Image (tube, grey):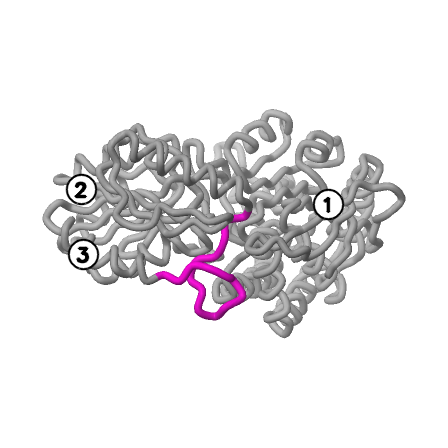
Amino acid sequence: MANIGSLINGKVYSGNGRVQYDVRNPYNGDLVGKVDFATEEDLRLAIETAEIVFNETMNKMPAHQRSLILRKSADLLESRGEEFAQLLCMEAGKPICDARGEVDRAVQVLRFASEEAKRNDGELIKMDSAVGGEGRIGFAKRVPVGVIAAITPFNFPLNLVLHKLAPAIAAGCTVVLKPAEKTPLSAMKLVTLMEEAGLPAGAVNVVNGLGLDLVPLLVTHPFVKKVTFTGSGSVGYKIKEMAGNRKVTLELGSNSPNIVFPDGDLDAAVAGMVKGGFAFAGQACISVQRIYVHREVFGSFLDKFIPLVEKLQVGDPVLETTDVGPMITEDAAIRAEAWIQEAVSQGAKVLAGGQRQGTLLQPTVLVDVTPSMKVVCQEVFAPLVTVIPFDTEEEVIAAVNDSDYGLQAGVFTSDINRAFRFFEGIETGGVWINEISTVRQDNYPYGGVKLSGIGREGVASAVKEMTEVKFMGIKLG
């Protein structure tokens, strides 16, 4: 069992009357670790340390050294992958097969960042393109913004942390990280590993605690120049308001649409939706939620889909055979169960699942839903999908766009012209053709529109978000 506090300038701050929090396995309630929450003094010290280390060390560190630290971190994480996967399984309730996949992705993020550290260059400006620009030269370079406040969620407690930390180090910034209070152990272990790989103490400082207690000071402190947050929309836009004129990146929620046409690969669509709708109990912002199926293949889709959903193994995440583990808390599972019951009372029909036992919610499929039901128009964040028939392209595009969210979508079709029509017509930050909305690689611009967020992640995009462009002009003699 781990016992941690906050990590500031390479030193753990714990005890001395600090509030202690139990980290428990969502599946069985077993105690996984104890965390001593940061005090306000701890938080101020973390921010001040990050400012000093930025000015004295990170801002002066050559790119090749930052790249090497990230590459060594990737190698260390890869060598200890099973150890991290087991920890994710215990603290987040993530099935071990999915936990290993998260570790593999995290290793890639570090390697992408290692490459990006050397690629963060500028451009030569052709000054004589403007009248009167003769005899002048100009160039622009990207410079790190400084101290970054990073606030991360429970659902990918390793990889989403690295989507903040790795680009920040690549850019030459420092970070104060507040991980989710339910899953802080992997974040602390990760930062310790990065320091072992050569990251200077204080380049990343970890403060553990409740968002209500720490976030207001964290995002308003004058030393903090950028805020990057992944989590719920209600919290994200409060953070944006508090952050004032600081740079802000928000990765928020969605109710991801997926569309199946008769000319699409029905078997591939079915298999993808089963994985994308129920992996990690649907607790992903790009989890498949709304499935729109052309009426011509609606019955065939359900005939293939329902039996596969019913075969999913629900239970202990440590078992190699488990497909769907627990939700993060029983309260989260109760909320999802209540939404199912409400939808049924409004006319929806349950074709699979719907039952709950503690934190375990059976993979659930609903039909006969309407756009105003919570299970359709809000983010479920649970192992629950709705399947909806449609007749025309115009009809389904309108249905997809009738949402406050717009993160990613999936479209199954073999018609290249239709693919581009949907790319242009769907109001989302990303569109996958012949893939589900849940697919995410860590090297492309990732983010949403509307209430799904502001800015883009993916290592190269995040580095740009964590830098400013600085110009220098020279008048030649």
Report the front residue among 131 and 300: 300
State the residue at coordinates (47%, 43%): 333
Name the disc covering residue 389, or none: 2
Check whether the beta carbons of the residues at disc 1 and disc 3 lie within 8 A of each other: no
**Which region shows up in magenta?**
312-328
Q: Which residue is mark 3?
A: 303
Q: Nearer the viewer, residue 146 or 98?
A: 98
What numbered label is drawn on residue 300?
none
Q: Give yes or no for contact between labels 2 and 1 (Cβ–Cβ under 8 Å).
A: no
| 52 relative to 281 in the view: left or right | right
- Which residue is farthest right? 16
Q: Residue furthest left?
A: 296
Mark 1–mark 3 distance (CA, rounded to whole Å): 47 Å
Q: Amino acid at mark 3?
A: Asp
Could you classify mark 2 by the number of other residues whose Cα lies within 10 Å: few (under 14), some (14-19), or many (20 or more)? some
Mark 2 or 1: in front is 1
Residue 82, image x, y percentages: 59, 71
Q: CA distance from mark 2 to mark 3?
A: 14 Å
